[in-house]
């Protein structure tokens, strides 16, 4: 039997992109997936809703529960966690994938955009874990994975988009803090970040269009990395800010051509990675 059979995984922002890729990977291994995201009507630029993602997960062999939740709203988080527990009996894994991005400098970052990134990336991530914690403490091989980068204080990562950088580094600090705080509870916590840009709607619509997408890897590289992290038992992996390539290399996987949008093409390094 798969080590993922009947493990319940709550994934924020799982209606598309990296979150959905993680959901599908774990569903194929028999996991129960909570699709916790805002989208109930499809945006043509982004694609996907919680319902379409849940349908794909079920088709992949997993069990899915679509729950509309805006993680800026604590009441919605509490309700989503309760629905997850009512359906599957508990929560074993939390994947903090939901995030807002604005690569603007101080002068061009509006207060509402600053607040949005803080509310989703930092506060929302914190509150999701806070309200899942009672169930993680009773969970099977409990684990938290937060999609955030290694913390580098190099000026190039601080100067260009400090408002966004603050929030992503705060997410990584949460991941590291939880590893220490929850060690006695047997809950592992790690951050994970891609070496290269990933072909998502955010990359295509906000960052670099098709040209950047063609210099990226597919979301499946993150999904596979998550799978290998979660395959470890106990606290074998905890307190790390992993890069996807690093996780795969530990499994003996060094040829990553299968993940390239354009096999053999030039790859673009992601933010915060030197």
Image: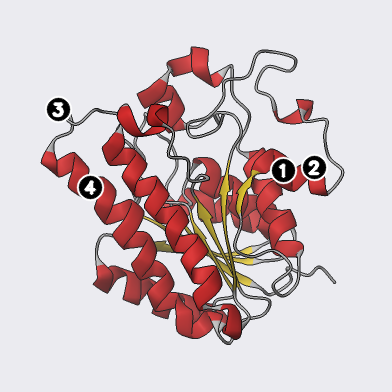
Q: Is residue 215 above or below residue 18?
A: above
Question: Which residue lies at the image location 31% right of the left edge and 29% below the top edge?
Answer: 159
Residue 264 in which image quadrant: top right
**Residue 177 x, y percent position in the rendering:** 47, 67
Q: Earlier in the sequence, mark 1 or mark 3?
A: 3
The quadrant where residue 75 appears: bottom left
Q: Give x and y (percent) for residue 168.
A: 40, 46
Mark nearer the N terminus (4 vs 1):
4
In the rendered image, which quarter contains the N terminus?
A: bottom right
- Work out how far the residue at label 4 is from the one at label 3, CA to CA, in angstroms: 16 Å
CB under 8 Å between callouts 2 and 1? yes
Residue that carries the numbered disc 3 in the rendered image: 107
Label 1 sits on a secondary structure element that is helix
Earlier residue among tags 4 and 3:
3
Residue corresponding to mark 2:
249
The residue at the point 16 percent across, 27 percent down is: 108
| Labelled pair 4, 3 in contact (Cβ < 8 Å) | no
**Mark toward the start of the polypeptide (4 vs 2):** 4
Sort mark 2 into few (<14), some (14-19) or many (20+) by Cα contacts within 10 Å: few
Please give the name of the residue rendered at 63% of the width and 28% of the height, measured from the top-left corner. Answer: 217
Q: SS of the residue at dot 3?
A: loop
Q: Which residue bears the numbered disc 1?
A: 246
Q: Which residue is mark 4?
A: 116
Label 4: how many residues lie within 10 Å, few (<14), some (14-19) or many (20+)?
some
Within 10 Å of the Cα at label 1, are there few (<14), some (14-19), or many (20+) other Cα atoms?
some
Nearest to viewer (mark 4 / mark 3):
3
């Amino acid at each position: 039997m798969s080590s993922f059979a009947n493990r319940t995984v709550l994934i924020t922002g799982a209606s598309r992109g990296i979150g959905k890729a993680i959901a599908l990977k774990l569903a194929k291994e028999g996991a129960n997936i909570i699709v916790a995201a805002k989208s109930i009507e499809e945006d043509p630029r982004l694609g996907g809703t919680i319902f379409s993602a849940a349908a794909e997960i079920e088709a992949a062999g997993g069990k899915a529960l679509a729950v509309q939740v805006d993680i800026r709203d604590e009441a919605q988080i509490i309700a989503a966690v309760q629905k997850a527990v009512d359906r599957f009996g508990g929560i074993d894994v939390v994947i903090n994938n939901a995030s807002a991005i604005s690569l603007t400098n101080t002068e061009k970052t509006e207060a509402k955009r600053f607040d949005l990134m803080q509310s989703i990336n930092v506060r929302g991530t914190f509150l999701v874990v806070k309200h899942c914690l009672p169930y993680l403490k009773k969970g099977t091989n409990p684990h938290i994975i937060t999609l955030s980068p290694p913390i580098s204080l190099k000026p190039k990562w601080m100067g260009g988009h400090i408002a966004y950088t603050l929030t992503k580094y705060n997410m990584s600090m949460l991941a590291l803090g939880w590893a220490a705080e929850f060690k006695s509870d047997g809950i592992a916590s790690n951050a994970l970040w891609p070496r290269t840009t990933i072909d998502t709607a955010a990359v295509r619509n906000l960052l670099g269009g098709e040209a950047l997408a063609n210099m990226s890897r597919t979301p499946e590289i993150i999904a596979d990395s998550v799978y290998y992290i979660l395959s470890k038992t106990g606290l074998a992996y905890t307190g790390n800010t992993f890069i996807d390539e690093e996780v795969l290399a530990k499994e003996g996987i060094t040829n990553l051509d299968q993940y390239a949008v354009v096999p053999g093409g030039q790859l673009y390094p992601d933010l915060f990675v030197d």
